[in-house]
Amino acid sequence: MYLSIMKRLPILLLLCSAALLCSAAPAVEPVTCSEDGGAAAARMAAHHIDENHDHGYKFKLKEIKGHKVEKVDDGCDIELQLDLQETTCHNINPKHFEDCTIRSESQRAVVANCSVRIHVANSAAKVKNYHCDTRQEKTNSEMARICPDCPSLVSLHDPDGMKSVKAAVQRVNENATNQNYYVLREVGRIKIGWMSSTGMNYWAEIALVESHCRNGTRIVPEACRPLCPDRARHAFCQSSYSSSQGLGSVECDYYPATNSTALGDGEQEPLCRHHHGRDHDGHSGRGPPNHDGHGGRGPPDHDGHGGRGGRSPPDHHGQGPPEHHGQAPADHDGHGGRGGHADGPPDQERQRHRPPFHRFHCHGSDTAIHPICPWPHPEPRGPRLKPKEEA
């Protein structure tokens, strides 16, 4: 038995090294109705926000601004006022949000002021609702006085910025080591800055998701649909682009699929209508390649911090599916439209692979950042689809 354990040990160590799962974040402390229980309640709230924030970047608790406990018949209601800070970990990054690095001021920091209500009954705590005001920590005019040379954020839909994004996606898909074509999931942020040597410069951060289209084949990129969230690999890429020289560098970190189970003989990849970057518990089960959770070269920040990058993706989990033409294109967030594809796995096979979906995207007043959406999310409008249609 000792020899058997020793044989398995290198494999376990390798998995832990690759996935960074050996140092999981400590468990959340129980939330009580005591007046000094604000820290535990705030940490629980931060975990709940992270689990439901499935776009943009992860946020980390900075400070408890207010903590009020009101006794009720079956326990208590807790009201919290919290300050959260945006991290450099994009939502597709499997790293635990508490282990992510806070974005510095020169990197155009983003903060969120959140009001959270928690109900405690019979020693069980439950978040009732929360809403957050998400904004840039400093306005453009304030940053111009503090750091005149620091780039500024522009709208995630900026036309010139989107030219750089489109060019970056194309560059990524020229990588012959990618077995499948990657489509844009969402734009994380776009910075701009003027340089006398190259004119206006654009630095974009984008999240990509693996699609069903095989790379290197004749395809229509707009027809490529993302694989199911647990079956797809993801990529977080940083690019540089100038008005005079066009696309410069594009460097990416790749995150493996959480479900690498090989498909059976004749089994096709399941079709998923929705897509988001993480499993329901907020983790995809693997750790990032480096401390900050991303590579690539960013703009010349005031503090001189750059990035690492240029990593190749791991081998794919198996043969890719045949191409399905005539399906709706992926939109800005990486969602594929509903396809009228008649073939594919039966309903029970689709259900076996389909993860829980709860993706909801709200829009704040600042179009340059991704806000924390209110929770509970509002019910979608229109008639609800039958289960068979949702598959």
Image (cartoon, rainbow, N blue to C red):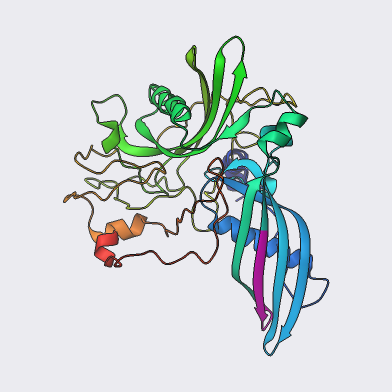
Residue found at the far bottom of this picture: 73
Residue in the picture at 69% in, 80% down = 123
Relative horizontal placement of residue 26, taking residue 343 as reference (left or right): right
Q: Nearer the viewer, residue 284 or 263?
A: 284
Q: Quadrant of the C terminus?
A: bottom left
- Farthest residue, direction top: 197
Farthest residue in the left direction? 342
Above or below, 387 against 177 in this view is below
| In-image side of 18 versus 63 (left or right) | left
| Horizontal relation, residue 66 to residue 284: left or right | right
* Residue 54 shows in this picture: yes
- Tell me where residue 199 sits by quadrant: top right
- Taking the image as drawn, is residue 318 in sight? no
Total number of numbered discs in the rendering: 0
Q: Is residue 378 magenta?
A: no
- Foreground pick, 66 / 356: 66
Could you tell me what secondary structure mostly forms the magenta stretch?
Answer: strand
Front position in the image: 282 or 116: 116
Q: Residue furthest right?
A: 36
Q: Residue at x 25, y 44 (%)?
A: 328
| Residue appearing at x 57%, y 54% in the figure | 372
The magenta-colored residue range is: 114-124
The image position of residue 86, as x and y in percent, is: 65, 45
Residue 220 position within the rendered picture, expressed as x and y whole percent measured from the top left: 25, 31
